[in-house]
Amino acid sequence: MRPKIVQIPSGFEVFFFKNVTIITTLYCDAFLDVCNHLTYLYKEFILLL
């Protein structure tokens, strides 16, 4: 069963995903291990949507 998706204001998803990508990229530059971990968590989160 898919989790219930809560209605959110239009444009928030794009804003959110852009910021997650930026944050992940910044961590990638500084900490490779953290980058790999965040990327894994990010992919797991996307699968939940």
Image: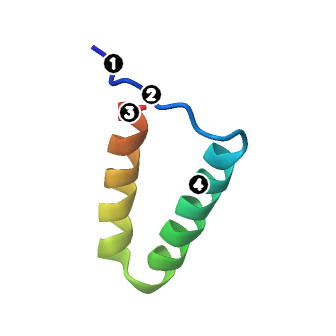
Q: Is residue 40 left or right of residue 20?
A: left
- For mark 1, what is the residue? 2
Question: How far across and how far down the image is residue 39, in percent?
Answer: 39, 57
Task: Estimate the spatial distance between the alpha carbons at disc 4 and disc 1, rounded to whole Å.
Answer: 21 Å
Please name which of the two marks, 1 or 2, marks the residue nearer to the observer.
2
Instruction: Kindly check if marks 1 and 2 are in contact, taking CB atoms under 8 A apart as contact.
Output: yes
Q: Which element carries disc 1, helix, strand or loop? A: loop
Mark 1–mark 3 distance (CA, rounded to whole Å) = 10 Å
Secondary-structure class at tag 4:
helix
Task: Describe the element under mark 2 as helix, strand or loop.
Answer: loop
Q: Residue at x 37, y 82 (%)?
A: 31
Q: Nearer the viewer, residue 39 or 13?
A: 13
Disc nearer the start of the sequence (4/3):
4
How far apart are labels 4 and 2 at the CA level?
15 Å
Question: Considering only order in the chain, which callout, 2 or 3, is on the residue closer to the N terminus?
Answer: 2
Q: Which residue is mark 2?
A: 5
Q: Amino acid at mark 1?
A: Arg
Q: CA distance from mark 4 to mark 3?
A: 16 Å
Earlier along the polypeptide chain: callout 4 or callout 2?
Answer: 2
Q: Which residue is mark 3?
A: 47
Residue 46 vs residue 1, the one in the foreground: 1
Q: Amino acid at mark 3?
A: Leu
* Dots 3, 2 in contact, CB < 8 A: no
Numbered mark located on residue 16 in the image: 4
